[in-house]
Structure formats: C-alpha cells, structure tokens
Image (cartoon, rainbow, N blue to C red):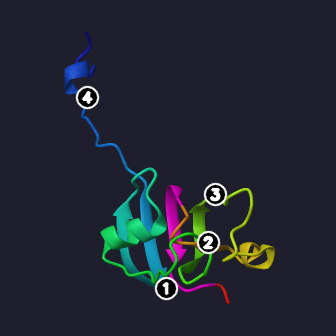
Amino acid sequence: MSANAVTAEEVPVTEEVRPVVRFLQGANLLGQAPLVEGNTLVEHAEDAGVRIPTNCTSGTCGTCMVTLLYGEIPLPEILPPGLDDYLVEECARLGCIGIPNGDVDVDIRPPL
C-alpha cells in the first residue's frame, strides 16, 4: 500500500443531511424543523416553534394558507374548497393538509 492510501477504517463518516422545512415571513427566517415524512406543514411548524393558524384541519376553510417558495408540496388530485386553480398558480398550499417532500421553504403569509 502506498504512503498516501487511505483504508476504509480511516475514511471519515459524515452525518446524513436530513431535509429541512423552513418557515419564513418575507426575508425573516422564523424557524425550521427536520423533515418528518408524513407530517403536515402545520405539524412541522409546531416542531419549529412557528404558529400557522388553523380552523378546519381538512383543507376546507383556507385559514392555514401559506406560500410555497421552494421545494415540493404535492396537491391532492381534487383541490379542496380552501384552494382554487388561481391560488395554486400563485404557489398557495394549505398547511393543514400539505405534506412536504424534501427541503421546503414556506412563507407563512398567503399569496393574496
């Protein structure tokens, strides 16, 4: 073995980088939480110490509407009453039913 060779035992182990859900209000970072698969935006916000108002928790009222800035939060096949096509085009998502995939940045203000 050459003097510069590295054995498997010497290779540093790096921690796995977990996706993060970040909550902003404009340019201000309010908090962030590691992604927990299957948790909604509202649950992630609670973990981050951020409050997103909710009412119905079923996507009906739109109280928890936020703006998706970065990442992916899939929409249901049939939009709930709290969303319409125009709002979706403006990157609106509902915190009570929105389940993020991977790194996500959300402005807690709706796109209205």
Is the residue under label 2 in contact with that under label 4 (CB below 8 Å)? no
Dot 4 corresponds to which residue? 11
Residue type at numbered disc 2: Arg
Residue pictured at 72% horizontal, 66% vertical: 79
Foreground mark, 1 or 4?
A: 1
Mark 4 is surrounded, within 10 Å at the Cα level, by few (under 14), some (14 to 19) or many (20 or more) other residues, namely few
Q: CA distance from mark 1 to mark 4?
A: 39 Å
Foreground mark, 4 or 2?
A: 2
Work out whether mark 2 precedes mark 3 in sequence or the reverse, and give the earlier one: 3
Residue pictured at 39% horizontal, 66% vertical: 43
Work out whether mark 1 precedes mark 4 in sequence or the reverse, and give the earlier one: 4
Work out whether mark 4 precedes mark 2 in sequence or the reverse, and give the earlier one: 4
Region in magenta: 99-110
Q: CA distance from mark 1 to mark 2?
A: 19 Å
Foreground mark, 1 or 2?
A: 2
Foreground mark, 3 or 4?
A: 3
Report which quarter residue 82 is drawn in.
Answer: bottom right
Q: CA distance from mark 4 to mark 2?
A: 43 Å
Dot 2 corresponds to which residue? 93
Residue 27's disc number: 1
Residue 58 in percent (x, y) is at 56, 69
Asked whether residue 107 is drawn in magenta, I would say yes
Residue pictured at 50% horizontal, 72% vertical: 57
Q: Nearer the viewer, residue 72 or 98?
A: 98
Work out whether mark 3 precedes mark 1 in sequence or the reverse, and give the earlier one: 1
Residue type at numbered disc 1: Ala
User: Could you tell whether 39 is left or right of 83 in the image?
Assistant: left
Mark 1 is surrounded, within 10 Å at the Cα level, by few (under 14), some (14 to 19) or many (20 or more) other residues, namely few
Residue 74's disc number: 3
Report which quarter residue 1 is drawn in.
Answer: top left
